Image (tube, rainbow, N blue to C red):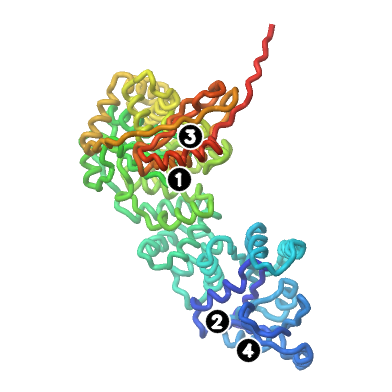
Amino acid sequence: MNTGKLFFIVGPSGSGKDTLMSGVKAFLPPHEFLFARRVITRTSVIDTEDHDSCTESEFLEREKQGDFIITWQAHGLFYGLPSSILKALHQGVHVIANGSRNEILALQAKVSNFCVIEISAPTDILRTRLIARNRETPEDIERRLQRALLPIPSGVSTIRVKNDVTLEIGISRLKAALLQDNHSTEQLSQLLYQKTNGASLTKAEYESLLPAIIRNTFSLADVQAFLIACTEKLSEEEMISIAHARTLLYPRLKWPQPVVMDKHSMGGILGNRVTMVVIPIIAAHDLMIPKTSSRAITSAAGTADTMEVLAKVDLTFDEVKACVTATNGCIAWNGKLNHSVLDDAINPIARSFGLDTRYWSVPSILSKKFSAGSTHIVIDIPYMPTGKVKNLEDATELASLFERVGQAIGLVVKAFPTDGSIPVGLGIGPSLEARDVLQVLNNDAQAPKSLIDKSIFFAAHLLSLDERVGNFSSGYQLAQELLHSGAALRSMHKIIDFQGKAKAVDLPIHTLDIVAHQDGAVTAIDGHIISGIARLAGAPTLKLAGIDLKKTIFDAVKTGDVLYQIQSTDKQLLQEAYLQANQHHGFHLESVIEHVHS
């Protein structure tokens, strides 16, 4: 029996098969791996694979003499794999050969230790790459794409490697396929490679592997390939294992109270500064609620950006502990507090390539809450066609996962799907969102009802987790009382004073209006477009930049009515945002037809 393994690499044109094979060579032990040189009846040129050339007559003569283990024809050429690879396999060397999927069964019949590695990419990526090569007609390209859909024969050991992100990640994935079972590869590397190839790992394996990643044991590309695999295939059992493993990475904060609250949102909604209203309500009830939040990544403001309009948010662990001890709450930036090599590695890739990180987020979020010392958490899961979570069904499933994984690591978690298509508040951008929050806490008549209602809903659910309150109805009534009595406002002032008041930005604000060009009713607002316009105006870097909504969902609109006002302290940025808004303002208006019934 052959002791080495033959890796037969196949893949359609445009998959980058030759590039990945060339790139992976530097990462393989040369005494353990041999790259087979195919014999091809064409002249060697720089732009093609490294191979041995011969004439057609020479090829046919060598075939008669048994120089090849298999031969085939394609594109008017003869191809052959030399029989010498059998000797290398018998000596325990692994052989990597580039070939055609039509020869898989013939080759498998001659080699006992055999594995196909299929390099692939989505059809649209393959088409783009083939067009860029400018070698074939559109008709030829489509024929190639159809051949790419042919399946690998059943019963053949196969590893599929996607080359659909970056070249470095593609090489790391191929390396993982070749080394995952290699006897000389270190155990931790093998675990990383096994997950990269879609295997499931145990709790003990994650507990060994994740600290090694934190210690920078592996290259960034290897870590990214591993994390992408975690977004593509992660069972509930693995989510629990990862959550457990991540809780061991950082010491857990200790608090003097047995119940420590937290509130989290998956994000993506316009406005939605619910957290900044909930925190002071809960703190006013004498419950501890340390809140660490992120800055904006793709939106016009994050919770930390908005709170920074009012107070210092760049707090250390000791400052957070002192603030919560003194006021029951805080709203701080998590940049100094929840640093994670894991998330720092995956976030840029997720943003650039639109990865679905929902299920990776479950153990990531919950382990951070655990490390922050939280015991009782409510989670807002907004769903919308353009958001992270697309529909109610997916949001309900994700909410259930949060609750079950939370319970498995000792947390009380209540997660709720919410409609993310409706803005929560009227301000978009740090200062405008802070204005909405203060209006709610001040019981101002101008306070946006959407922010009031959602804040009381989530505050009520948190309060109901306190045994002194006991149920949602009592929690709802209590949340209203704490807000309307001014107790929440006083609590917020205590938190702001302790964290340190922000220095006021004394700059002139310039504004431009975006108006409706038809009568109708607002049936949808594209949050992605609105956030993009606010960011063009300078948000969140410019704290006073943003969008002030004058109309929202279901509002009636007349031609010439102001839909929203763009503001900025930078006239040039304001003009750029204004031009963009006049091309696509983000509001969907439909004509209103009134039916009169007698």
From what the image shows, is residue 205 above or below residue 247? below
Q: CA distance from mark 3 to mark 2?
A: 52 Å
Residue 416 bears which disc, if any?
3
Ranked by sequence position, the earlier of labels 2 and 1 is: 2
User: Sequence order check: which comes first, mark 1 or mark 3?
Assistant: 1
Q: Quadrant of residue 323?
A: top left
Which amino acid, by three-letter code, is at mark 2? Phe
Mark 3 surroundings: few (<14), some (14-19) or many (≥20) residues within 10 A: some
Whole-percent x, y for residue 134 in the image: 68, 67
CA–CA distance between discs 4 and 3?
62 Å
Local crowd size for mark 2, using a 10 Å CA cut-off: few (<14), some (14–19), many (≥20): many
Please state which of residues 438 and 475 is positioned toward the viewer in this rendering. Answer: 438
- Disc on the earlier residue, 2 or 4: 2
Q: Residue 87's mark?
A: 4
In depth, the one of 210 and 539 nearer the eye is 539
Q: Nearer the viewer, mark 1 or mark 3?
A: 1
Which quadrant of the view contains residue 84?
bottom right
Q: Is residue 27 left or right of residue 88?
A: left
Mark 1: secondary structure: loop
Q: Secondary structure at mark 3?
A: strand
* Residue 68 horizontal/vertical position (percent): 72, 87
**What kind of element bears circle 4?**
helix
CA distance for labels 2 and 1 = 44 Å
Residue visible at 53% across and 74% down in the picture: 23
Q: Which residue is mark 1?
A: 298
Q: Which mark is residue 235?
A: none
User: Does the image show residue 36?
Assistant: yes
